[in-house]
Image: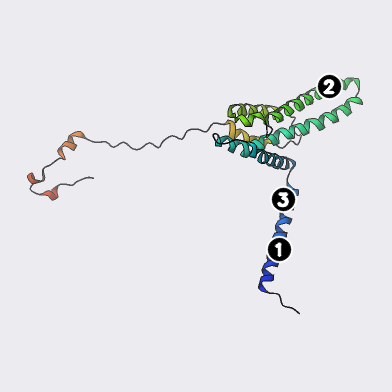
Amino acid sequence: MESISDQQRAVASQLTKAYRRILRNRELERAKILTQKVYDCCFVNCLKALKNMEWSHRLFYRKLYLGLVPHLLGCVDRVISYAHSAKARAKKRLRAAKVDDLEGLNKECAELGFLFRSSKRLHKALDPSSELHKQQDIEQLKILVVETEVLVKRVPPGSGLDVQFNLDIAIKGIVTEKKASKPESKPELLVDNANCLDDWVDVDDVDDVEDYVVVE
């Protein structure tokens, strides 16, 4: 039987590690919630659009663009998906609804329609290739963050949107102003002017220099 060389063992070990890494990545990918997958997709789209952007003067906006805009886009995309599917279900119920239920269902459809239109508008404004990012307008970006927050709050609880974590990151990183750190106060050095004048002594006039203590 042919023996296995050390080099072959090393290659086999590397292949095994690579295979296990692929399996782990697949398991992590399957374990991701829908919001995480949407965020990943938004990040990739921003990364692709990055090549066509000019960042020479606004490197700070570039950090916002790659670090925080994908979180914001992920929130908007989830609202779009929710509003679209929820409105489709509401329309089905509307067709089979009794007269007494029509008013409530019509209001629900109107609200879902508003959510869908508003989220589509926000998505267009926040799109990785939008004019907002080309202009690198931070103030307008802050406005869109606030509008996204208002929109998310209109989604009924229990809808499974699961975007609060991403929204909080975007708000904290884009809208919330950092408090300026106060400089540490240094203790004041109290100096007695009278004693200070007395400390100026001519050594030649002193009989015993050791009687004087020099304080540095």
Residue 23 in percent (x, y) is at 74, 56
Q: Are marks 3 and 1 in contact (CB under 8 Å)?
A: no
The kind of secondary structure element at disc 1 is: helix
In the rendered image, residue 50, in percent from the top left (x then y), is placed at: 64, 39
Determine the residue positioned at 19% across, 37% down. 196
| Left or right: 76, with 213 as reference point | right
Report the number of numbered marks: 3
Q: In whole angstroms, how far apart are the C-alphas of marks 2 and 1?
A: 59 Å
Q: Is residue 88 above or below residue 36?
A: above
Residue identifier under label 2: 106
In front: label 2 or label 1: 1
Say what amino acid the circle numbered 2 marks: Asn
Looking at this view, name the residue that lies furthest to the bottom: 1
Report the amino acid beneath label 3.
Leu
| Left or right placement of residue 189 versus residue 28 in this view | left
Task: Give the Cα separation between the discs numbered 3 and 1.
Answer: 20 Å
Looking at the rendered structure, which numbered label has been put on residue 28? 3
Q: Which residue is mark 1?
A: 15
Q: Of helix, strand and loop, which one carries label 2?
A: helix
Q: Nearer the viewer, mark 3 or mark 2?
A: 3
First of labels 3, 1 by sequence position: 1
Tell me the mark number nearer the camera, choosing from 3 and 1: 1
Q: Nearer the viewer, residue 204 or 50?
A: 50
Identify the image quadrant of residue 157.
top right
Query: Of label 3 and label 2, which has the lower sequence position?
Result: 3
Disc 1: CA contacts within 10 A as few (<14), some (14-19) or many (>=20): few
